Amino acid sequence: MTDNKLINLVNISKSYGDTVVLDDLNLYIRENEFLTLLGPSGCGKTTTLRIIGGFETPDQGKVIFEGKDITKLPPNERQLNTVFQKYALFNHMTIAENIAFGLKIKKKSKNYIYDKIKYALKLVNLEGFENRMPDSLSGGQQQRIAIARAIVNEPKVLLLDEPLGALDLKLRQDMQYELIRLKNELGITFIYVTHDQEEALTMSDTIVVMNQGYIQQVGTPEDIYNEPKNAFVADFIGDSNIISAIMVEDKVVEILGTKFPCVDTGFGRNQPVDVVIRPEDIDLVKPEEGIITGRVTSLIFKGVHYEMEVLANGHEWLVHSTDLFPVGSEVGIKVDPFDIQIMHKPTSEDEEAVDLEE
């Protein structure tokens, strides 16, 4: 991946009536990057995508594409194509006619269009589907045709707005790998919108976590998962234990009255902080071997692991383990210092952990 900035969003703000959807957003997208805008409903991710695509105009700010200001340029004049969750195929046209639609508008030759249809169908693994009608295809096949229709126009950027949202779980997982393969074969930039954390972690080079019109964190999937910047990110990406604590000094944090060694520095002495510990990073051991002790209060078998809750020092700890500890067991809790993530307390509402119903 190059560091070449293909798209630069500069000081973008957008409101609908009194509702501020984006507030002074700054973001750049590199060439040949798979970038995902991730967040709950209403966080501003789809509005950001629509502004990039030219379907919305920002109230303030600029959209820069390859160094040129395209803020006022209509969608059909931008070197990008959009794939929506609702595939928007033309039901009265064959698959070939659907794919060729944009090329015919551009007055391309019949031979060129024929070759492009063949190429696009091969790319999405639907060779021989030229004369089928959309309503004879499954949801996954229709979505692949929508993607084929977008890529025949040779866009530099493909915008994807929750394109897998309507598919069932297995098909969605298959399509995730299809999209990664497509992106690598085409060598173009993908900008993807989703509220599905697993989808974002699986496919992306870069994840942009958004909430209430603000960017909370930008980073690789590993960074976002292992080093969340605030309680919102930690809570939204995977399961977490988020606990109020005191940073006693560098590399020592007091959690629920007990001092734990950690690796973080620079938070000052005796400062209130939030601690994030992922459930899979908690080791349950014999009571005498733990830093603190507790009792297992609930147990669920999840297939890959057991999910347990352990009441220790007045707090319910969420634990994922391949080892089974029955309800009622006395256990010790150990956490590797590298697995304790220290965060500053939220300074605004959008940084706080929230209960998500999605």
Image (spheres, grey):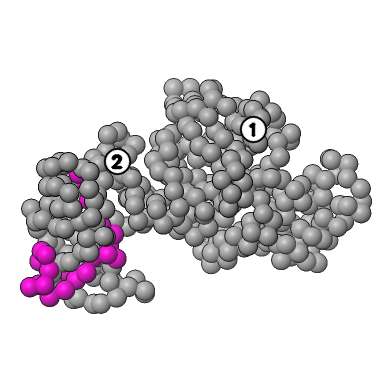
Q: Dot 1, how many residues are within 10 Å of its Cα: few (below 14), some (14-19), or many (20+)?
A: few
Q: Nearer the viewer, residue 276 or 113?
A: 276
**Res 135 quadrant in image:** bottom right
Q: Which residues are magenta?
A: 273-297
Q: Position of residue 179 (x, y in %)?
A: 61, 59
Identify residue for label 1: 67
Q: Amino acid at mark 1?
A: Gly
Q: Is residue 196 visible?
A: no
Q: Nearer the viewer, residue 32 or 244?
A: 32
Identify residue for label 2: 352
Q: Is residue 224 visible?
A: yes
The answer to whether 172 is drawn above or below residue 76 in the figure is below
Q: Give me the residue at 54% from left, 64% from top.
A: 173
Q: Position of residue 189 (x, y in %)?
A: 62, 48
Q: Nearer the viewer, residue 343 or 322?
A: 343
| Majority secondary structure of magenta residues | strand
Q: Give me the residue at 42% from left, 35% from top.
A: 214
Q: Amino acid at mark 2?
A: Glu
